[in-house]
Amino acid sequence: MFSRIKEDIAAVFDNDPAAKGWFEVFFTYAGLHALWAHRLAHWFYRKRLYTLARIISQISRFMTGIEIHPGAVIGRRFFIDHGMGVVIGETCEIGDDVLLYHGVTLGGTGKETGKRHPTVGNNVVISAGAKVMGSFKVGDNSRIGTNAVVLEEVPPNSTVVGIPGRVVKRDGVRVGRLDHSNLPDPVLEMFRQQQKQIDEMKLELETAKQKIGGSIQHGAQSV
């Protein structure tokens, strides 16, 4: 047990340059506290003491702002940086050396039964606010970008960004032509479409006025 605690603390130093010392990390890092509470809750969950496991999980959620279902399986050297708002579902499986930032959700997409949460491979980084939803695998050594919404399997050694999430790099090679420095603005695009429709209506109205004016002028000349 103590060797695992030392390993957990060492993982903090490997991933967080702001960590100053063992005493600070041990007493102030909510991600560590949530992980340790989860291990206890998971032990009771495996013994089928589900209510007790959930009570421990909820106390941990109240204290840390991190919700990990007791049924989730988590590997070694797992680290949650900052942590507030992280949610990890019941059938989620997480490999070794995984790093999560605040606001990450590893959840399901509905009321399906069985395996309904993602499986996260080894050495994966999931950035702040990302949502990984569904029963699929995020491959080893992959990176999920900030606020990405991932709804399908991620190949190993990939970088995923956007809503919905798209693979933009795989095995170090850029995929596709998605330029994230020049993404479309959906609100601006909507206003452009509305302005286009207004301009078309103005043109049609002006054409109708000219036709009506011409008809009136022609009728007056006939009289």
Image (tube, rainbow, N blue to C red):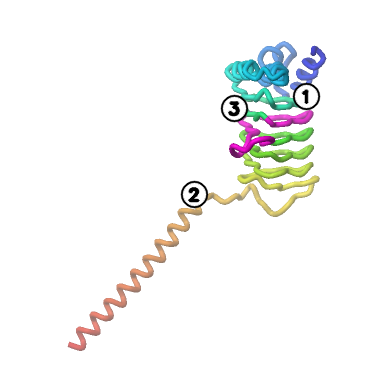
Q: Which residue is mark 1?
A: 77
Question: What residue sits right under mark 3 in the picture?
Answer: 85
Please tell me how crowded label 2 is: few (under 14), some (14-19), or many (20+) other residues with Cα within 10 Å.
few
| Distance in Å between CA atoms under marks 3 and 2 | 28 Å
Magenta stretch?
91-116
* Residue 114 percent location from the top left of the image: 68, 35
Q: Nearer the viewer, mark 1 or mark 2?
A: 1
Which quadrant of the figure has residue 84? top right
Disc 1 to disc 2, C-alpha distance: 42 Å
Disc 3 packing (10 Å; few <14; some 14–19; many ≥20): some
User: Residue 125 placed where, x, y %?
Assistant: 72, 34
Q: Residues within 10 Å of mark 1 (few under 14, many from 20)?
A: many
On residue 187, which mark appears? 2
**Is residue 39 something one can see in this rendering?**
no
Among the 4 quarters of the image, the one containing residue 191: bottom left
Q: Amino acid at mark 3?
A: Gly
Asked which quadrant contains residue 146, the reply is top right
Circle 1 SS class: loop
> Nearer the N terminus, badge 3 or badge 2?
3
Q: Do the numbered discs 3 and 2 sit on residues whose CB atoms are within 8 Å?
A: no
The answer to if 98 sits in the magenta stretch is yes
Whether residues under marks 3 and 1 lie with C-beta atoms below 8 angstroms apart, the answer is no
Kindly tell me whether residue 205 is visible in this rendering. Answer: yes
Point out residue 132 in the picture as x, y percentages from the top left corner.
65, 38
Query: Considering depth in this image, is 187 or 100 the residue closer to the camera?
Result: 100
Pointer 1 with pointer 2, Cβ within 8 A = no
